[in-house]
Image (cartoon, rainbow, N blue to C red):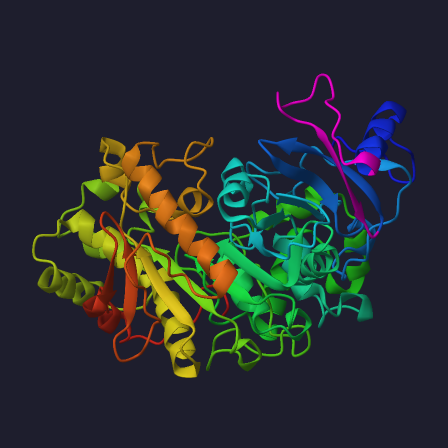
Amino acid sequence: MNSAPLDMPCNPRRRRLLQAGALTGAFALLPGTAFATSRTTLARTRSGRIGGTIEDGVHVFRGVPYGADTAPRRFQAAVQESAWRGVRDCDAYGASAPQTGGDGPGSEDCLFLNVWTPALRDGAKRPVLVYIHGGGFTTGSGSDPLYDGGALVRHGDVVVVTLNHRLNALGYLYLRDLGDARFAQSGNVGQLDLVQALEWVRAHAAEFGGDADNVTVFGQSGGGAKIATLMAMPAARGLFHRAWTMSGQQVTAAGPRAATQRAELYLDALSLPPARLERILDLPLQALLDALRVRDPSRVESSSLYFGPVVDTVTLPRHPFWPDAPPQSAGIPMVIGNTRDETRAFLGNDPDNFALTWDTLPGKLRTQQFVDLDPSVVVAEYRRLYPDYTPSEVFFAATTAGRSWRGAVEELEVRAAQARNTWAYQLDWFPATEAGARSRAFHTLDIPLVFDTIDAPGSKTGTDARARAMAATMRDALLAFARNGDPNHAGMPHWAPYSLARRGTMVFDTPSRLVDDPRGGERELYQQAPFVQRGTQ
C-alpha cells in the first residue's frame, strides 16, 4: 500500500502542498500523478490528516484505515487505528483481507475503506452510501473497479464508501466453545469489522460532506447477506437507515453446534488439537489459508468449509430473518433484489450444462438445486409451467430458484408482514449479444448497472444505448432510495412496495415494468420444502 508510514511525517513537499490547499481552498496540481486531472485534497480523520486526489471533480480517498492491524488480535474484535503525524497518503487501495483466489493472499492489516465525495466540510448533509462487497463471507474486497463511486457521486450528489473487512476463518471461525475469553466473539468478528466501519462513517460523515443520519448500506451476494445479518445485530442499531441488497440473503445463521463442528474440522486440518488452541494465534497466515480447503460435510456437492455469522446469543442473538424479520430494523426501508438467471454465472462455464437431455437433467439437479426436492417432481413442474423450455433452460431456472432466489422470497415475506417499506426487484435485462444470450441476467450483472460503471474493467453489460439506459434507471433508483427511502423516480414506472397480497416486483428490463408475483409457480414449487440457509446447519 502506498501510504505514509504510521507515526511518521509524509513527504515534505506533498505536506506543504496539502497544507496550502487546506488553508486556501485551492488544490495544487502534483506532477506525475496517476490521473491527468488529479489534484491533491486533504481531509481530517480522528487519527490524523489524509491526502487524496480529485478525479473528474470528485474528491477520492483510498486506503483510509478504520481499524488497527488485526494480526495481534486474531479472532478478536478490532481496535481503533493508531494515530499518525503529518499527512497520510490515501491515493491507493489498502490490502485485501487474507483469502485465497484473485484478491489473495491479502494481509491481516486489512481494515481500510475508500471515500468518494463532491466536497468536504461544506455542511451539505448528503446521503451516504456504504457498499459491502460480495464473495460470500470468504473472498472479495472493496477495491474492484466496478465499485468505483465516481458516477454515483456525480449523478446524485452523494457520498460513497467501500471497504474491506475480515473474511473466511479470520472473520468467522467460531472458537468460543473451544477456547478462553479471547475467542468469545470469534464467530462474528468479520461482522464487527463492518460495525466498526459504520461507526467510522458516522463519526466522519460531516467531514466528507455527508449526513450521519442518512446512511444507506448496499451490497451484492455476500454483501447482501452481511447486510441482512447487520439488521439483526444490536451493535449495528442506528448506524444505517436504509438497506439495498442484490442477490444476497441471510435468512438463518449458523448455530453454535454446527459452527463448532466446522471449527474442529478446520483445527484438525491445522494439526492443532483444541487443547493447544492458543497456538492458532501465532501460526503463519498461509497455514490458515491452506486449511480453508477442507471439505464441508453438510454440502452435497464438493465444497470447502462454510464460514459465516453465528448465532452466539450476544453479537448475533437471533437468526437474521427467521422466524420473522428482525424487530430492531422494522423501520429501515429495504430493497431486496435478484437477477433472473443467477446460476448462469456459476454453472454456465460448463458446456455440458448447455447440452442436457431430459434423461441427464435429474441427476444434475440432484446436486445443484440445493433444495431437497425430488428432481423428477421439479422437472415435471417446470415442463408444465414453461413447455417451451429446453432441459438446459429448466436446469438454470431450477438451480436459480432453488438457491438464492428462495432466500429472497423468505425475506420479502417476513418484511411484508412487518411493514410496507420493502421493495422487490428482478433483473431480466441482459446485453443483446451472443455472449449475453448465453449468460442472460447472471449473478453480479446488476453491479455495474447500479454503480453506473458499465465501461469499467470487468463489466459485461456492454456500453451501448440499451446498457446506458438500464444503468441510468437502476442507478437513479438507488439514488432516490438513498435520498428519500423510496426507490421511485421519474425515469421508471411506479414501483409499489412488496405485499403478500400482490407480491409486486419491479422487473428491470427494456421496458421495465411492475409485475405481481413473477415466477409464482416456481415459488409455490419450492415452498414444498422447508428453507434453511445453506451452510448454516
The spot of residue 323 in percent (x, y) is 46, 82
The spot of residue 112 in percent (x, y) is 70, 46
In the image, taking residue 54 as reference, residue 18 lies left or right, namely right
Identify which residue, 253 or 82, lies in the foreground: 82
Q: How many marks?
A: 0
**In the depicted structure, whether residue 425 falls above or below residue 346:** below
Query: Is residue 407 found inside the magenta-colored segment of the image?
Result: no
The spot of residue 215 in percent (x, y) is 60, 61
Q: What residue occupies the far front of the structure in this picture?
A: 24
The spot of residue 118 in percent (x, y) is 62, 43
Q: Is residue 350 visible?
A: no
Quadrant occupied by the N terminus: top right
Query: What span is colored magenta in the figure?
Result: 23-46
- Rendered residue at 41%/61% (across/down): 487
> To which quarter of the image does residue 506 belong?
bottom left
Identify which residue, 176 or 383, lies in the foreground: 383
Q: What residue occupies the far top of the structure in this picture?
A: 32
Identify which residue, 61 or 365, lies in the foreground: 61
In the image, taking residue 229 as reference, residue 376 lies left or right, namely left
What is the magenta segment's predominant secondary structure? loop
Identify which residue, 433 or 270, lies in the foreground: 433
> To which quarter of the image does residue 188 belong?
bottom right
Query: Is residue 41 found inside the magenta-colored segment of the image?
Result: yes
Q: Is residue 294 visible?
A: yes
